[in-house]
Amino acid sequence: MTEPLLHVDGLSIAFPSAKGMSQVVNDITFTVGREIVALVGESGSGKSMTGRAIMGLLPANARVAARRLGFEGRDLLTLSSKEWNRLRGNKMGLILQDPKYSLNPAHRIGRQVEETLLLHANLSSAERRDKALDMLDKVGLSDPKRICSSYPATLSGGMGQRVMIAAMLANRPKLLIADEPTSALDKELQDQILTLLRKLSEEFGMGLLLISHDLQQVSRYADRVIVMRRGVIEEEMASVDLASARSGYTRALWAARPSAESYQTRLPVYGGDE
Ligand SMILES: Nc1ncnc2c1ncn2[C@@H]1O[C@H](COP(=O)(O)OP(=O)(O)O)[C@@H](O)[C@H]1O
Ligand SMILES: [Mg+2]
């Protein structure tokens, strides 16, 4: 049997603290194929650190260990920093909550979408421009030419997130990690962005790891869900089976149905930061 696209086997992450090492992810194992997998759990459960470990983007003081971090048949743990750089933005992409922190305010959008192509593909500048325009069109931005010559500050949050998706998908990565990609947006925009991510994942045959604290919401877009709690995997199941989840924790997350009015406020958490 061939290995799935991503095979996280026995991943542990710890940080040094005053009381010794503090374990934030503890021996988790899961796979992601060409499918949408939601990684859910309350704030502080270790979701973002898991995503960053897969991207090789953990803070410098983090200690990471795993039996294997398999990606397309290679073990990510053995990569040099040069090899990581080649992989990121090319075979793997990361989208974070707020495009404000990912887009450079001093550069026009077109340049930033083209930058990923500059790093990884052998294209002429005209070809890069065409590809950037094509991607901006694919993420549903009307008038891509105007967007290309705009600066990030002129974009709304939803448009900014569409630009990020265009930039991340320009090289047709095999795996996209989206960490709370819609948490900064209002309800209607959240559904639009998640619908777009699902559509493009299917169109490009891409694996998507969708990180979220909102189980209700992401389960509508994911094939499978992995529920994390305090650094371990509590439960893993197909989204369609969520109604019969065994774990009380999963059921509590499932029942935390935010109403339209409360969508902008945070769900109650057991502890940790965000
Ligand atoms: N740089 C760091 N140093 C020490 N602890 C950290 C650091 N970054 C995150 N943590 C801790 O790791 C735990 C998991 O964090 P995170 O993966 O961001 O959770 P989630 O994304 O599920 O909300 C949290 O308890 C957090 O406080
Ligand atoms: Mg997080």
Image (cartoon, grey):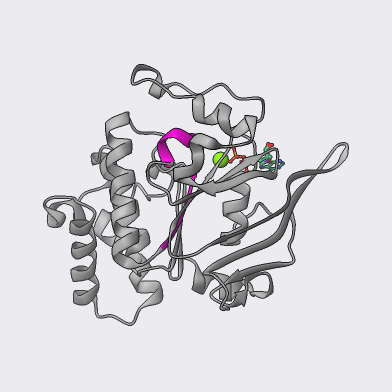
Q: Which residues are magenta?
A: 207-218
**Nearest the camera: 90 or 234?**
234
In magenta stretch: residue 209: yes
Check residue 22 for magenta coloring. Answer: no
Whether residue 108 sits left or right of residue 255 in the image: it is: left
**The quarter of the displayed image where residue 257 is located:** top left
Give the percent coordinates (x, y) of residue 60.
69, 54
Quadrant showing the N terminus = bottom right
x, y (%) of residue 143? 11, 52
- From this view, report whether residue 124 is shown above or below residue 91: below
Where does the image place residue 162, in percent across and percent down from the top left?
Answer: 29, 49
In-image side of 214 versus 133 (left or right): right
The quadrant of the image that shows the C terminus is top right
Which residue is outermost to the top? 261
Residue in the picture at 39% in, 65% down: 206
Viewer can see residue 35: yes
User: Does any portion of residue 157 appear in the rendered image?
Assistant: no
